[in-house]
Amino acid sequence: MQSGLGVKAARVAIVVALFAIWEILSRTGIVNPRLLPSASDTLATLGDLLQRASVRKDLAVTATEVVTAFALAVPVGALIGFLIAENRYFAEVAKPLLFFAFSIPKSIFLPMFILVFGVGFSQKVGFGFFSTIFIVIMSTTTAVESVKVEHLTVARSYGATPMQTAFRVYLPSMLPVLLEALRISMIFNLTGVILAEMYASRDGIGHQIATWGENFQMKQLLAGVVMIAAIAIAFNELVRWVEARCSHWRT
């Protein structure tokens, strides 16, 4: 317990130290304050931005796009990954192709999404879906392959139905791996949606960040970066908390 508190205290100390270094670099002029506003000014700007209705609206737009893309990519990717893992021949054919597709930078396809879907909700959700689904497929395939064969053999020898096998054997064995995959998938998903908003969009927090950058509004730009980072970290820690509660299922 004490060691756990010590680790958390060390993490907090590192974050505080980074903000302190940031503040010193800006305040002392080591880095031009116009290029790197101080941490205190950035946090004050963040508080001001969150009070603006336009920024809250953009956050709501981005959240809707992220949740929609995630809600589509996870079940579709999980189903495809499960079917690949369950068919040995299909797995041998498809898995190398998936690795090839995963290695290609997804950003090069963004202009195609704009041409097909136009500039709007569908384009951003579609690109978020595209950025996410490959990691979901690969993670699900790995999760299915992690299920112990002896567990399946025992369940089937006792006459378990496919539905019972899915919920009593596959799901408990796969859940810890899938939760880890969800954390990684959300990073790809959020990155894809934000990138689509920055590249071509009329709304969303990514569009706002791109506008602040183009207009050299560094306080607002850094405040937007801190905002997105805080949201991503909060989701990551939430899934880690759930994962810790399910870690006993690994055995």
Image (spheres, rainbow, N blue to C red):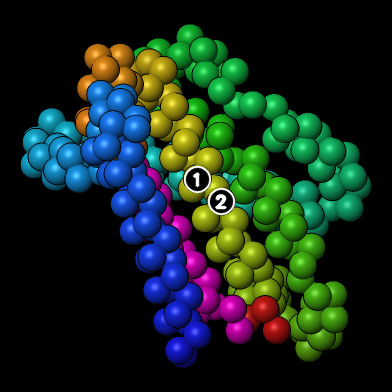
Residue 229 on the magenta segment:
yes
Where disc 1 sits, the SS reads: helix
Q: Residue at x 31, y 51 (%)?
A: 20
Q: Which numbered disc covers residue 184?
A: 2
- Residue 209 position in % (x across, y down): 30, 27
The stretch of residues the image draws in magenta is 228-248
Quadrant (top left/top right/bottom left/bottom right) for the C terminus: bottom right
Which label is found at residue 187? 1
Q: Where's residue 144, x and y in %?
A: 74, 62
Locate residue 63 relative to residue 156 in the image: left or right: left
Q: Tell me where residue 174 appears, x and y as whole percent.
A: 66, 68
Looking at the picture, tell me which residue is in the foreground, 57 or 21. Answer: 21
Q: Residue at x 85, y 75 (%)?
A: 149
- Seen in the image, is 37 located left or right of residue 193? left
Q: CA distance from mark 2 to mark 1?
A: 5 Å
Q: Residue at x 18, y 40 (%)?
A: 41
Is there a contact, CB below 8 Å, between mark 2 and mark 1?
yes
In the image, farthest residue toward the top: 115
What secondary structure is found at the residue carrying circle 2? helix
Residue 163, compared with residue 86, is above or below; it is below
Q: Residues within 10 Å of mark 2 (few under 14, many from 20)?
A: some
- Tell me if I can see residue 50 in this picture: no
